[in-house]
Image (cartoon, rainbow, N blue to C red):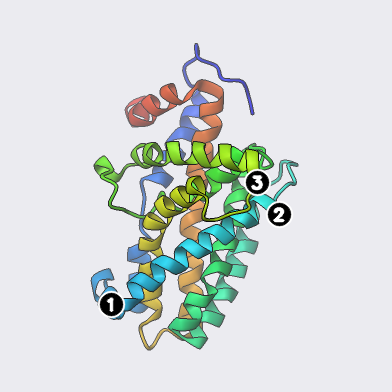
Amino acid sequence: MMPEITDLELSASDLRDLRVARSKLETRDLVAAVADVVGKPTQALLKRLPRRWHAMIGKATQAALFKGLGFVILTLGNTRPQASRDRLHKMLATTSGMIGGAAGLTSSLIELPVSTCLVLRSIADIARSEGHDITRLEVKLACLEVLALSGHGDDDVPGEGYWAVRGVLGKSISEAAAYIAEKGLVDEGAPPLAKLITKIAARFSTVVTEELAAKAVPIVGAVAGGTINLLFMQHFQTIATGHFIVKRLEAKYGSERVQRMYGECDRIS
């Protein structure tokens, strides 16, 4: 990580990057894109899910996130800068979705840990492409944080904005990082890990529920199931790119300055 610089305004190129990041982070069009695939709005899709499925999806999402956290922490370690392999991860997600779509909704729920790990692997790939050291625990947890940046929760986040969500998650991420650094990823029931996973799952599960509701439409099948997974992957790749551009600029200029400029960059020539 670059040392923090506190006495500089953003350079012209960094300001352009911040504008790109903001456009990616403030555009949340997954629901509309999925509705286009199946020809139904979100509320109509959600009505197709039996009530008991909402609780099942919540539990499955928490399990998938813990598996994804272990996957990111244990398997990613190549720090050599390189372009992110977005197309490869989109292809893998599409294939996974086609299998789940062909086999039905129950199979899609079983496939959730696989798709979550694929998304997290792609997010980490993007973090590395933005110059972040993905062997660092805080970067790996920032990858998990991306999954919460798209959904909505019951945690009273004013405006549901990017910085507000990060503020809600910040303390939990710090506590989980301290626990993992001391004891490792050994017990998913440990309070710091359970708290973090619960917070992220509460938001991520809203996106997962919408995705699975779309797959519950009888005509979906393999092709549309693959397309929905492709949109899911593409959506989180977009958010990850914006998030790790911001994190890169924070390392250079400081969080307070970047946050201020994030809100003002559209008004600055």
Occupied quadrant, residue 68:
bottom right
Q: Is residue 46 left or right of residue 8?
A: left
* Residue ID for mark 2: 75
Element carrying mark 3 = loop
Residue 39 visible from this viewpoint: no
Q: Earlier in the sequence, mark 2 or mark 3?
A: 2
Label 2 close to label 3 by CB (< 8 Å) = no
| Sequence order check, earlier mark of 1 and 2 | 1
What residue is drawn where x is 47% and y is 61%? Answer: 62
Depth check: 17 or 130 in front? Answer: 130
Instruction: Name the residue tied to disc 1.
Output: 51
**Residue 18 position in % (x across, y down):** 46, 33
Real-space Cα distance between discs 2 and 3? 14 Å
Give the percent coordinates (x, y) of residue 234. 50, 59
Mark 1 vs mark 3: which is more N-terminal? 1
Characterize the local packing of mark 1: few (<14), some (14-19) or many (20 or more) Cα atoms within 10 angstroms.
few
Question: Mark 3: few, some, or many residues within 10 Å (few <14, many ≥20)?
Answer: few
Residue 268 marker: none
Q: Is residue 200 visible?
A: yes
Q: Which residue sits at x=28%, y=77%?
A: 51
Residue at image x 60%, y 45%?
A: 140
Reading the image, the residue beneath label 3 is 184
Please state which of the two labelled residues, at mark 1 or mark 3, is closer to the viewer.
Answer: 3
Q: Give the answer, above or below, for where 206 lies relative to 142.
A: below
CA gap, disc 1 and disc 3:
37 Å
Secondary-structure class at tag 1: helix
In the image, what residue type sits under mark 2? Thr
Q: In the displayed image of the protein, which residue is found farthest to the top?
A: 7
Looking at numbered disc 1 in the image, what kind of residue is underneath it?
Arg
> Within 10 Å of the Cα at label 2, are there few (<14), some (14-19), or many (20+) other Cα atoms?
few
Question: Eyeballing the image, is 72 above or below 12?
Answer: below
